[in-house]
Amino acid sequence: MTVLQTLFDTIEARKGADPASSWTAQLLAKGPEKCAEKFGEEAVEAIVEAVRGDRARLTAEAADVLYHLLVMLAARDVALGDVLAELERRAGTSGLEEKARR
């Protein structure tokens, strides 16, 4: 099992938990829109650190982005496995070809 799957499973386990018991439960209790908003905030913070060139800060922000992406997926009942399957489907396909198909 990958660290992302383990994290996703933990996030899933927090669904319906007492919001006072965990940050993840608090986010999920606020609904998918708030989860999406928080993901966007973290993505912007990662962009800022990428532009600044601070590798340590970018690494930390990238971890936040991945966590909040998984929370957002869980809030909308999208399984990590489904996302990974889509990536596998795209493997070996040129990004240019993939974009042209859309």
Image (cartoon, rainbow, N blue to C red):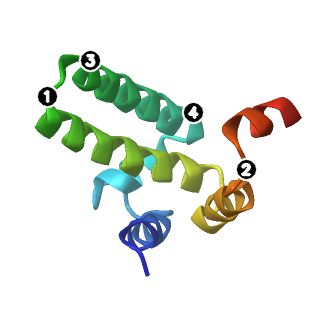
Circle 3 residue: 51
Circle 1 residue: 54
Query: Mark 3 Cα within 10 Å, few/some/many (few <14, many 20+)?
Result: few
Q: Amino acid at mark 1?
A: Asp
Q: Amino acid at mark 2?
A: Thr
Of the numbered discs 4 and 3, the one sitting upstream in the chain is: 4
**Looking at the image, residue 14 lies above or below residue 49:** below
Q: Which mark is residue 33?
A: 4
Query: Mark 4 Cα within 10 Å, few/some/many (few <14, many 20+)?
Result: some
Of the numbered discs 2 and 4, the one sitting upstream in the chain is: 4
Q: From this viewpoint, is residue 102 visible? A: no
What is the C-alpha distance between the residues marked 2 and 4?
A: 32 Å
Please identify, in this view, whether the residue under mark 2 or under mark 4 is nearer the observer: 2
Q: Quadrant of the C terminus?
A: top right
**Looking at the image, residue 58 lies above or below residue 11:** above
**Looking at the image, residue 39 lies above or below residue 23:** above
Q: From this viewpoint, is residue 23 visible? A: yes
Circle 2 residue: 93
